[in-house]
Image: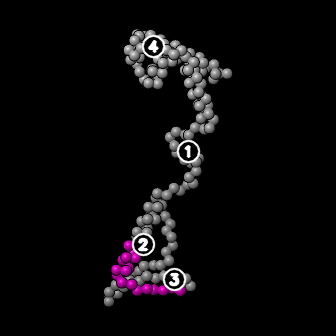
Amino acid sequence: MLYRTRAYMLRQVVTEDGTQYFIDFKDGQGVFHELNVSYDFFMAFRRLELDNRKLENWDCRHREFNEVWDETLNRRVLRLPKSVDELIIEEEQEELLYKAINDLPDIQKRRFLLYHEYDYTYYEIGKIEHCRPQAVRCSVILAREKIKAQMKKYLCA
């Protein structure tokens, strides 16, 4: 991991008289300076340096190292977005389906929609319409066959 080159250096010198703390740096003209600082100032500077290193490490770990484009994002998704062609075809198929449902006789249309769209059972629909569940079932199956035939006619053409 590369860190930014520091423009200064922290050092401490231990002598018989005690410990001295220095910050060494070069100014804009390239002249070297040695600054003697107090222990508190030295430790504050050191804490600042450590916090800065932590931030750089965090940033490096959580940064996205590749370009984020639509292509790279699409590779990561679970379900790829549909192309414009697919969306148009799907819309046309929906229109055909609704047209085929509208072409059914009223009783078949009502029973088909109650069964497939509103999730009623044959028994519940029979109760609503005062008829037997077998009649409802036959009606829904006939409606489904008519819709399949009409859709097949349009899709194969």
Find the distance from the CA under tag 2 to the CA under tag 3: 18 Å
Tell us which disc is closer to us: 4 or 1. 4
Residue appearing at x 46%, y 57% in the figure: 62
Q: Quadrant of residue 46?
A: bottom left
Residue type indicated by callout 4: Arg
Residue type indicated by callout 2: Glu
Find the distance from the CA under tag 3 to the CA under tag 4: 91 Å
Circles 2, 4 touching at the beta carbon (< 8 Å) = no
Q: Mark 2 or 4 closer to N-term?
A: 2
Tell us which disc is closer to us: 2 or 4. 4
- Residue 32 vs 53, above or below: the answer is below
Question: The residue tagged with tag 1: helix, strand or loop?
Answer: helix
Circles 3, 4 touching at the beta carbon (< 8 Å) = no
Find the distance from the CA under tag 3 to the CA under tag 1: 49 Å
Find the distance from the CA under tag 4 to the CA under tag 1: 44 Å
Question: Relative to residue 33, is residue 44 drawn left or right?
Answer: left
Nearest the eye: 53 or 130: 130
Residue matched to label 3? 26
Magenta part of the chain = 31-48
Q: Mark 3 or 1 closer to N-term?
A: 3
